[in-house]
Image (cartoon, grey):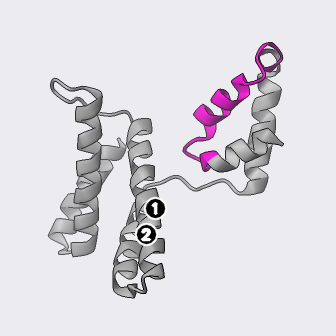
Amino acid sequence: MLRQQLQTDQIQALKNHNKIKLETLRYVLSEIKNKEIEKNPPAGGELSDEDTLTALQKVSKRLEEAIVSFNKAKRQDLAKEYQDQLNIIKTYLPAKLTDEQLKKAVEKIKAENQETIQKNPKAIIGICMKQLRSKAEPKKIMKLLSQ
């Protein structure tokens, strides 16, 4: 579903002569295709929306790191170009939870899985990561769980 949306938007960007969006979507789709090949070597096969979202998040993180590097090197032209690409990618990512919302979500997961946590206290990490990975940064989730 997400991949189809990306492909549809790529065609629309091509028709509208939107160069930045077109280049960004081509890059993202190539990353997704590489993940498909990596995951299913013989023929490829489509990724699930969750895997596609993970690939988008990795591209987003890579762009954020590049922007920081370009700003340190005083390359505002490249920083702006990458920021534009990042803004395009962020439209496809789900909204991130605030710290307050994340805390409530973790508490809810802990309450729902109380029995599992009593048997294996470390199990909450995997459960929270699986449910909240697309909604929050793993570092924030781990920080909350370690408190």
As rendered, which of 133 and 61 lies closer to the eye? 61
> Mainly helix, strand or loop, the magenta region?
helix
Left/right placement of residue 113 relative to residue 35 reads right
Considering the numbered disc 2 on the image, is that residue within a helix, a strand or a loop? helix
Over which residues does the magenta segment extend? 116-138
Query: Is residue 117 covered in magenta?
Result: yes
Considering the numbered disc 1 on the image, is that residue within a helix, a strand or a loop? helix
Within 10 angstroms of label 1, few (less than 14), some, or many (20 or more) residues? some
Question: Label 2 is placed on what type of residue?
Answer: Asn
Left/right placement of residue 146 relative to residue 93 reads right
Q: Is residue 91 visible?
A: no
As rendered, which of 145 and 15 lies closer to the eye? 145
In the rendered image, the quadrant that contains the N terminus is top left
Residue at 57% in and 41% down: 133
Q: Which residue is mark 1?
A: 90
In the rendered image, the quadrant that contains the C terminus is top right
Q: Position of residue 116 (x, y in %)?
A: 76, 16
Q: Which residue is mark 2?
A: 87
Left/right placement of residue 27 relative to residue 103 reads left
How many numbered circles are shown?
A: 2
Q: Position of residue 120 (x, y in %)?
A: 76, 17
Within 10 angstroms of label 2, few (less than 14), some, or many (20 or more) residues? few
Residue at 70% in and 23% down: 123
